[in-house]
Amino acid sequence: MADSAETRKLVYLVTGGCGFLGEHVVRMLLQREPRLYELRVFDLHLGPWLEELKTGPVQVTAIQGDVTQAHEVAAAVAGAHVVIHTAGLVDVFGRASPETIYEVNVQGTKNVIEACVQTGTRFLVYTSSMEVVGPNIKGHPFYRGNEDTPYEAIHRHPYPCSKAQAERLVLEANGRKVHGGLSLVTCALRPTGIYGEGHQIMRDFYHQGLRLGGRLFRAIPASVEHSRVYVGNVAWMHVLVAQELEQRAALMGGQVYFCYDESPYKSYEDFNMEFLGPCGLRLVDTRLLVPYWLLMLLATLNALLQWLLRPLLLYAPLLNPYTLAVANTTFTV
Ligand SMILES: NC(=O)c1ccc[n+]([C@@H]2O[C@H](COP(=O)([O-])OP(=O)(O)OC[C@H]3O[C@@H](n4cnc5c(N)ncnc54)[C@H](O)[C@@H]3O)[C@@H](O)[C@H]2O)c1
Ligand SMILES: C[C@@H](CO)CCC[C@@H](C)[C@H]1CC[C@H]2[C@@H]3[C@H](O)C=C4C[C@@H](O)CC[C@]4(C)[C@H]3CC[C@]12C
């Protein structure tokens, strides 16, 4: 589409816009939304890379703010046509307290919804997660499932519980009257495990491998499959949903969609090795040496150590009872 002033009229707000996914959403909007007039990037921690984005035709507004603060959210939302809400505490390693996870992921989402209602913003896209569905606490596999597949979504961990609550709030808010009398249109996206440029967990595996002399030790059977999805495709999915939400409000409003892009179904570790192998690491198959019960013991010891050391330092290894259980349960969409 020709770049002309009259086509640029939309104001977007991306919360968590400096995060792993958020940054890709910000860059995708600048590349793929020709109607963009202003792009507001709202985050607790603003990245220095935002400065380089301010030289283009779109007004990029960096807003340092906290989604748990309703007034800060309302100020950022006011005047926006679309909100893409990615901000959240993605913590399954025990770094934050359950209360903080709830405060950010649930209360923060409530604040975004209420800000849309109060200021008249009609379109809200929420970044939910596969974990809203599973794996559940019983370790039931979810094999090539979809949004309609029956599954007992029972959770105890603060992160999936908070994502499930937030997703429900977003979907229930669909159809609420916003300031000005029109209806709020909401939609939630459930990415599976996202990978790609800037993925901190992939970095953590890489550095763990370097510490272990270029080796990683298999803890997950290759038969366990996880769906993974490239971050650029997840960003594109968010832009597509945002662009279509107005024209297809009746079809998409209040709906939830898994995000998957045909990335190979592999175990979490084997999928990571697609990238870490070419970086010089190799996966040593120690499954025969390290039975599951011993892994669970090690994971439990990690959790105990985390609890004991908390007054002194944050000890948050990749392996804990929750991550081991998730890693060992097939979840493919
Ligand atoms: N990474 C994945 O595999 C994955 C998969 C499915 C869904 N998700 C969801 O995608 C979203 C983004 O995840 P991510 O992997 O990019 O995580 P991330 O931690 O890289 O990004 C989250 C961003 O939110 C910001 N943030 C945190 N608390 C905030 C607050 N109180 N106020 C304002 N900003 C705050 C952080 O500063 C960060 O920039 C999250 O909602 C997460 O639940 C992630
Ligand atoms: C046995 C361990 C040592 O090799 C393996 C640990 C792997 C775990 C760190 C990861 C296995 C599955 C991951 C989660 C999954 O990809 C989906 C998620 C949903 C998303 O909303 C947030 C991230 C995550 C919880 C992701 C986190 C890391 C794993 C538990």
Image: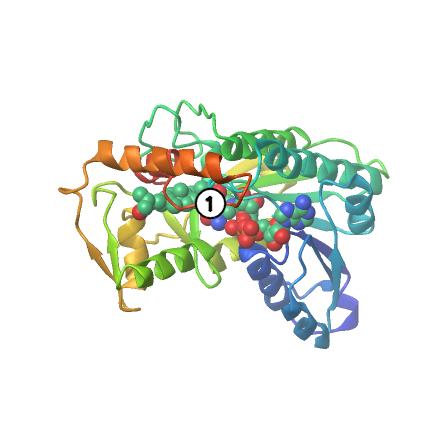
Residue that appears at 20% across and 42% down: 223
In the image, farthest residue toward the bottom: 55
Q: Is residue 70 above or below residue 21?
A: above
In the image, farthest residue toward the right: 180
User: At label 1, which amino acid type do we have?
Assistant: Tyr
Residue that appears at 86% across and 39% down: 180
Residue that appears at 53% across and 29% down: 161
Q: Give the side of residue 251 with respect to residue 227, left or right.
A: right
Q: Count the numbered circles shown.
A: 1
Residue 57, quarter of the rendered image: bottom right
> Is 80 or 323 nearer to us in this picture?
323
Q: What is the secondary structure assignment of the residue under circle 1?
A: loop
**Quadrant of image for the N terminus:** bottom right
Residue that appears at 23% across and 31% down: 293
> Is 85 or 100 nearer to us in this picture?
100
**Residue 137: percent from left, percent from top:** 39, 25
> Is 178 or 109 nearer to us in this picture?
109
Which residue is disc 1 drawn over?
315
Q: Residues within 10 Å of mark 1 (few under 14, many from 20)?
A: some
Residue 177, quarter of the rendered image: top right
